[in-house]
Amino acid sequence: EDSPKPIVCEAPCVGYSFSRQQQVLPLIMAALPVTFWLSIGAFILWLSVGISVGIYAALRRGDRPAADSLLRALGEVAKLPPANDRYGGNPQVPAILEKELRAILRAADGANDEAVALLREASGQQEALPLEYGPPDVVKPTHELLGELLLAQGRAPEAQQEFVRALALTPRRTLSLLGLARAATAAGDTAAAAEAWADLRSVWRRADPDLP
């Protein structure tokens, strides 16, 4: 019988793939571009999310200068060029987050119409994003945020529509359900309000008793 041919692994040898009948090093080198762009995309995405959380924290403690500074930083992140292949982070996400946070600050300044316009633009951008699995890139859904802003302005019917749309995109999300229940109640839509409260009780049936 013929003896098996010896396997030759030329230096630098980091291993041999018997399933592919080739050295491992070329496989690693072929995968490096994908790994690189995944890392760049993830860095930009989580930098945007981290800055957004920082802005929310600054607003909660009343530190407007810090919030403005962080918003400028997020605006610069939104201007970064997208990765040049499909493995990079979605370039629209930082821009959407920047519009959301700018809308919050404009609403705090009393510029409610401008804030609403920003959020309507952001919601259109978010709806155009491709469907992906895993945690959402836009951590605060734009329709939900717009609904909360409209409800705070006393525009309950419009707010109700935004919460309905938010729930169509993220079914049974508790903050959207809570917003819908409150908006429908304020708008006098008792049937929709009762249904939303019932859904919320079902979701929160094991929650702490002091939740709304």
Image (tube, helix red, strand yellow):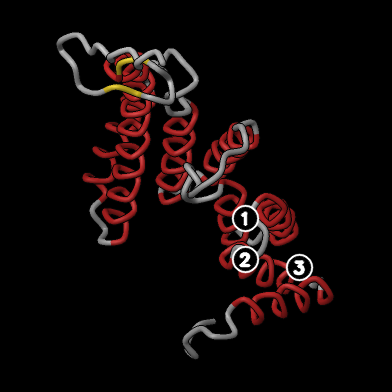
Under mark 3, the amino acid is Ala
Residue 5, how many percent across, how many down? 33, 12
Label for residue 89?
Answer: none
Label for residue 147?
Answer: 1
Relative to the observer, which residue lies in front, 169 or 18? Answer: 18
Q: Mark 3 or mark 2, which is nearer to you?
A: 2
Looking at the image, is mark 1 or mark 2 earlier in the sequence?
1
Badge 1 vs badge 3, beta-carbon distance below 8 Å:
no
Q: In this figure, which residue is indicated by the disc labeled 3?
A: 187
Residue in the image at 55% along x and 52% along y: 145
Under mark 2, the amino acid is Gly
| Side of 5 relative to 164 (left or right) | left
Picture quadrant of residue 37: top left
Relative to the observer, which residue lies in front, 211 or 185? Answer: 211
Q: In this figure, which residue is indicated by the disc labeled 2?
A: 179
Identity of the residue furthest to the top in this view:
10
Residue in the image at 22% along x and 44% along y: 65
Label 2 sits on a secondary structure element that is helix
Residue in the image at 41% along x and 16% along y: 1
Is residue 83 positioned above or below 95 on the image?
A: above
Looking at the image, is mark 3 or mark 2 earlier in the sequence?
2
Residue in the image at 37% along x and 35% along y: 45
Q: What quarter of the picture does the C terminus occupy?
A: bottom right
Structural distance between the alpha carbons of marks 3 and 2: 12 Å
Is residue 96 positioned above or below 169 on the image?
A: above
Badge 1 vs badge 2, beta-carbon distance below 8 Å:
yes
